[in-house]
Amino acid sequence: MNRKISLGLCLTLIILTVAATFSVTMLVSKRIYNRIISNLSQRSQVYSTMDEINRIVSNYYYGSVPDTGKISVYVAQGYVNGLNDGVSKVLTAEQYKAYQKKMNKSETGCGIEIYFDAENGKLLVAHVYDSSPAKKSGIEAGDVITSIDGEAVTAGNYKKLIQKLSGSLLSTVKIGYERGGESFSDTLSTGFSVPSCLGVLKAGVGYIKISGFYKKTADDFRTALTSLIESGAQSIVIDLRNTQDGTIDYAVETLDVVVPSISSNLAVARDKYGNVYKNKVYAAETQSISSTFAVIINAGTKGPAELFACDMRDICGARLVGETTAGVGTMQEVFTLENGGALLLNVAKIIPYAGEAAWYGGTGLTPDVKATLTGISEKEISPANFTKDSQIKAAFDILS
């Protein structure tokens, strides 16, 4: 069916709101729009092009045209995607709620870390958190999860099924698993608060995997690090491979757990004019936990994780092991929108402790010890695969 939309309605909702304000359809603010397209003739050309596209779509598009609200969202996303920085994005109301939940690290589960062994087609338990429902039920690292809520685990459905392993205090999941040829099953609560840092002691060396830099990460990191040192760890490997979520603020808070009091700053945020952005000058506190460190990095190490690795190298003398990082040397800020969504926008460059010359912006941090991942795939990175993981082995070798 050929469905037409009103040109006046479409342009009013899509174009005029772009140049006016963050309104219900929330495209972008007039200030930002006019700053980028300050020439009146350029704006007129943009309006003309959109008018032309609207006429063509209305008359010839084979299919149902979305309502103007959805089109407005797509236009807003396209506008921000046009900044082409790989970081800034428009979040819908639902996406913004998920983002806030992640930053507050209110992720819950039954207390297991898992990975899929593609070679053998098995979903394996990599780690079981202390005091978790899984720990209390007797599940152990190395167990093979065979079913989730009665559905057999396969290579085609495991990604969908593992979503059932998280939930609330009132929800449960039934897990079937095997160990040594025997089969077991148990029903577990999914309300366990999952830490953002996983700590394991191996051969006198502590290993900490940081999943992201969230509100609770500094506390989780301090807990994991203290526990490992008290258990006899002589040195610490921090795994930042594929770590990119979180904020600069939370990354600095986590750094502060190990960094001693210094005369310089851990980092400074500067806007495009070179001025300090909103008083974002990060100083070190007086307390710290000292040890010998190695930090594993790769191309998925991004943003806050890069700052953490950079300052760990330059302040704590950590050796960087692995592959060159992503090279995102900026800070993002979230601007809430009236429609319940948000704009995540690059707002400043981050200058680390050792100054801009030590920084990674655009090129990435280069490892002190280059080590390519072999033996396993990136999806199989976990404490359960220590003996197969070439990058963990390289980090352990320089600390042993």
Image (cartoon, rainbow, N blue to C red):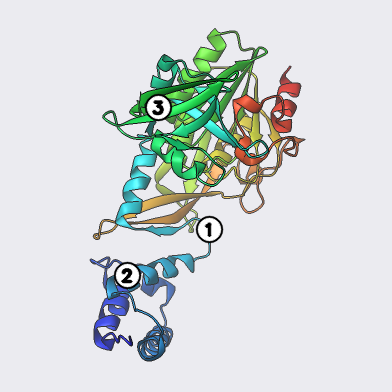
Which residue is rendered at x = 57% and y = 19% of the image? 200
- In this rendered view, identify the residue nearer to me: 396 or 2: 2
Q: Quadrant of residue 56?
A: bottom left
**Upstream in sequence: badge 2 or badge 1:** 2
Up-down: is 283 above or below 225? below
Q: Amino acid at mark 2?
A: Lys
Q: Is residue 354 visible?
A: no
Residue plotted at (26% across, 77% down): 13
Whole-number angstrom distance, CA of label 2 to CA of label 1: 23 Å
Q: CA distance from mark 1 to mark 3?
A: 34 Å
| Element type where label 1 sits in the image | loop
* Earlier residue among tags 1 and 3: 1
Residue flagged by tag 1: what amino acid is it?
Gly
Q: Earlier in the sequence, mark 3 or mark 2?
A: 2
Do the residues under discs 1 and 3 have CB atoms within 8 angstroms? no
Mark 1 sits on what residue?
Answer: 86
Distance, label 3 to label 2, CA atoms, is 37 Å
Label 3 sits on what residue type? Answer: Cys
- Residue at the image point whose x is 42% and y is 43% from the top: 280
The numbered dot on residue 115 is none
Task: Give whichever of 369, 383 is nearer the camera.
Answer: 383
Looking at the picture, tell me which residue is in the foreground, 132 or 250: 132
Q: Is residue 376 left or right of residue 209?
A: right
Look at the numbered disc 3 and give the secondary structure of its residue: loop
Picture residue at 74% right of the left edge, 28% below the top? 394
Name the front one of labels 3 and 2: 3
* Mark 3 crowd level (few <14, some 14–19, many ≥20, 10 Å Cα): many
The residue to which callout 2 is attached is 70
Q: In the rendering, at what x and y percent does residue 133 appear?
A: 38, 20
- Residue 45's x, y, as percent? 42, 87
Residue position for label 3: 110
